[in-house]
Image (cartoon, helix red, strand yellow):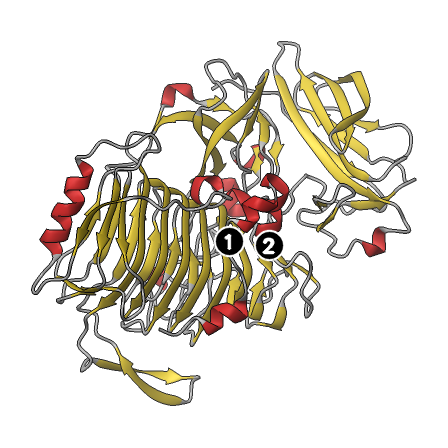
Amino acid sequence: MGGSVQCEVEMRHPRIACQIGIPAITAVGDVYPVFRIRARTESTLSATVLRNREVVQTLSGIRLPCGETKTVSVPGTLERAGGYEIRFQFMDPEGRIGYDSYYFTAYEPATAASKGCAVVYEGTDGTLAYAADFRGNRIPDFSHAGYRGGGRPIPDVAVRETLYPEEGDATERIQQAIDRLSRLDPDPDGFRGALLLARGTYRIEGSLSIRDSGIVLRGEGCGPEGTVLIAAGKSKRTLIEVCGPGEIAVLEETKRKITDLYVPVGSRTFHVESADGYKTGDQIVVCREGNREFIHEIAMDRITPRPSDPASTRQWSPFLLRFDRVITRIEGNRITVDAPVTAAIEHRWGGGWIARYRDEGRIAQVGVEGIRGISEFDPAVKDSRRDNGRLDREYKADEEHAWGFISLNHVKNAWVRDISAFHFAHFTVHADRGSKWVTVQDAATYDMISIITGGRRYPYFVSGQLALFQRLYVETARHAFIVNSHVCGPNVFLYGIANDNYGTSEPHHRWSVGGLFDNIRGPIAIQDRQYMGSGHGWSGANYVAWNTETQLVVQKPPTAQNWAIGHVGSKGKEAFAPREQGYWESFGTHVRPESLYLRQLEDRLGADAAGSQGEYSLEVLEGKASF
């Protein structure tokens, strides 16, 4: 991959906050910012000033001598309200080009105080508007999460075969029926059909696997009188595995370097050194490097070792975040993708690149629905724990039984709905790293059985991307709604209740990015976890807690931000303090809109799309939570 022009740019303004994660706001009538620019090679600068994406003025032909610092001013004042972007293009004598942009929002002085939430508010056109920081980082559009990219109803797939309860182990009988569906030709929508398990109880001594596209495993309800699958025996396993044959294959020869010095959080557009060979509709990875300099900047090479076991604490190593995207537009070397990146791609920390990939290993249009899962366990196996540090409390702790109910891996456009889970040790649903465009909805988890320690009781677990988990009820979890390491958003937990918790819902470790906790009632923590686990450190960046309830911890990681908006309840106990606080607004009072995800979905696709997702209410969810 070739090089690009590099310049150091500093934005200055007496009233605009030039800090990562802080809204860059000023008033109509104010002056433009001033920029101090130092080029590492001789370059020529041109600039375009935009307001609400429309060009206001341009500058061109500004010479930047190598190694010298030059002050560049935009003439005039801010005549109208709106979101401003100043785009810079640097060209060296060999014709190589680099790009950089800076952002701020101008309000009318009389209306600035009436905006409500400063970072997300209703714009003049009736849709949500976003106040970015000076580098353009903003709360992302989370509405692309979910089946078929969000806003599409889950289909009702026609039944092609029906089974009924019989005595004995039903594993082979059900698996053979699934395999028979696999041999059918898919219809034009990609479906082979649904296997219906009629109401009643089925004893499963092994695991069930869906390995081909277009298959749905359906029961007749997740209540006690519906379809009940008993995970029998002492094997630690997942009861239902939905999994394609393998990972996507990145085409190394198609790599193109990103030439923007900074691509902000929430952006869908960036420049590459060459778009030759790419076209609209291409599936690509957008990769963001995290080099050793970045890890040093966020102090994750200096994690304090665990006092009781120093050897268990691992310092971080360089890593990649790989955003799975589709190209929607190409203009020269400027590429637009279908969903935003949720981590800033910054040249000084290694920059980023794109590449096409082959997607032969993922299956699609698959689902599990209408089933009650129960993991058999030995109730005589007990353990005890300190209850709030005062009393010993005995609990059921058998671990020789099924650990997971449903896993989804190497899938896209997949779903799980209308399920209930009892006694599993690890998870109810895990959207694993090879999953994309997944919806999990209308699910409940009860009475998890395991030792209460690490690696257990993660009922709704996200390791993939563009996943929507909605209308969920949980009891007895350690981390009810949890995101794995290095996970790329957007990912969403929407309307959920977690009761009788042994820990917090959270991004769990190692810089997962771009998650939304939207109308979640239960303790949440988005923070530096330092030596917890194996050196989990900064668990998540660019997360949003929106209209959450009970307890909340939100810290600001170096180089990024986390947002807490409309939280009602208390601030929870931080694992390690002091740390800089995230962006808190409207603490103690919910904000409008009630749901960020649903309003973003409405803005993007219309009211019908938001309405197709179903009914939402924490009170109704609490009332439906007992089976």
Which residue is more in the foreground, 159 or 229?
159
Please report contact status of discs 1 and 2: CB closer than 8 Å, yes or no. Answer: yes
Q: Tag 1, which secondary structure?
A: strand
Residue 390, x across and y down, in percent: 42, 89
Quarter of the view holding residue 545: bottom right
Kindly identify the amino acid type of the residue bearing the numbered disc 1: Gly
**182 on left or right of 620:** left
Q: Residue at x 58, y 62 (%)?
A: 554
Helix, strand or loop at label 2? It is: loop
Left or right: residue 70 compared with residue 140: right
Residue at the image point whose x is 9% and y is 61% from the top: 169
Furthest toward the bottom, the residue is 391
Which residue is denoted by mark 1 in the rendering?
A: 540
Question: Is any part of residue 250 visible from this angle?
Answer: yes
Quadrant holding the C terminus: bottom left
In the image, residue 189 above or below residue 98: below
Residue that label 2 marks: 562
Residue 449 point in image, percent of width and height: 27, 72
Q: Quadrant of residue 190?
A: top left
In the depicted structure, whether residue 336 falls above or below residue 311? above
Instruction: Report whether 594 appears left or right of 350.
Output: right
